[in-house]
Image (cartoon, helix red, strand yellow):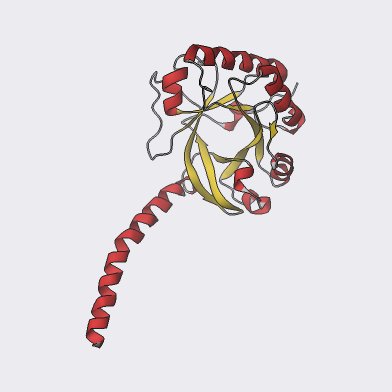
Amino acid sequence: MKQYIVLFICLSLFNILPSTAQNDDQESYIQCEDTCRHVHGIDLSHYQGEVFWENVGANSKMAYVYLKATEGSTHIDETYERNIELAHRYGLKVGSYHFFRPKTDLTKQLENFISQCRPGDQDLIPMIDIESTGGLKTDEFCDSLFKFLDLVEKAYRQKPLLYTYTNFYNKHLKGKIDDYKLMIAQYSDEKPQLADDRDYTMWQYTAKGRINGINAYVDKSRFMGRHSMREIRFKHF
């Protein structure tokens, strides 16, 4: 009887091991940024919950953080003020981003953003998160976006960084935002390939990153090629 029990346990372990190995492979990819030579960072919002910044700041590989400040004309991220204060305190370079709503009043969106994203608090240029056309046709969407980007540039006296996905860029923005630096999101082990082969500054490569001090998944990004943080420093006039 004992022999049958031992055999059963061995077979059970054999069946479990491949699954465990697969999970280890996935986890090792998610964490690969911690051992490569590129400059890495994260972006955060209220979705990550409470952040223990002393632990985040102790991670020497995470050099910067983009914090969600606002969305549309009225939404303010509830964790923004605390996060920006503590991110500075624990040594990260900080930037702020606004989630763009194409059908929402542009002036009110700008007012909402500048009420939170104050120049004196910024190490990195503002970032505009572009993920939706809001149901508009591409021409209408682009008209709204470009007008908003002009407002942002005039307010901060510098062009913002633009964040979007590979497919969204290829479908709606290809060849239309060449004057802007880009952070491209593509969650895979292959670098994004834009349809017009244009250069981009940063790559957000996972939405399931892990880092000490944050219990939830974290979006992680890195600079591409010879690009560096110097290119997105906030200019204080």
Seen at 39% across and 56% down, the residue is: 24
Is residue 158 shown left or right of residue 5? right
**Does residue 118 sit above or below 207 in this rendering?**
above
Seen at 49% across and 11% down, the residue is: 139
Is residue 178 shown left or right of residue 4? right
Q: Nearer the viewer, residue 219 or 141?
A: 141
Where does the C terminus fall, quadrant-wise?
A: top right
- Residue 95 on image: x %, y %: 65, 33
**Does residue 78 sit above or below 155 in this rendering?**
below
- Residue 129 on image: x %, y %: 57, 28
- Residue 50 on image: x %, y %: 66, 51
Is residue 166 shown left or right of residue 133? left
Where does the N terminus fall, quadrant-wise?
A: bottom left
Q: Nearer the viewer, residue 164 or 61?
A: 164
- Residue 132 on image: x %, y %: 52, 26
**Residue placed farthest to the front in the image?**
135
Seen at 63% across and 17% down, the residue is: 148
Where is residue 149, by image quadrant?
Answer: top right
Callout count = 0
Seen at 66% across and 53% down, the residue is: 52
Q: Nearer the viewer, residue 226 or 188?
A: 188
Q: Nearer the viewer, residue 86 or 137?
A: 137
Where is residue 167, by image quadrant?
Answer: top left
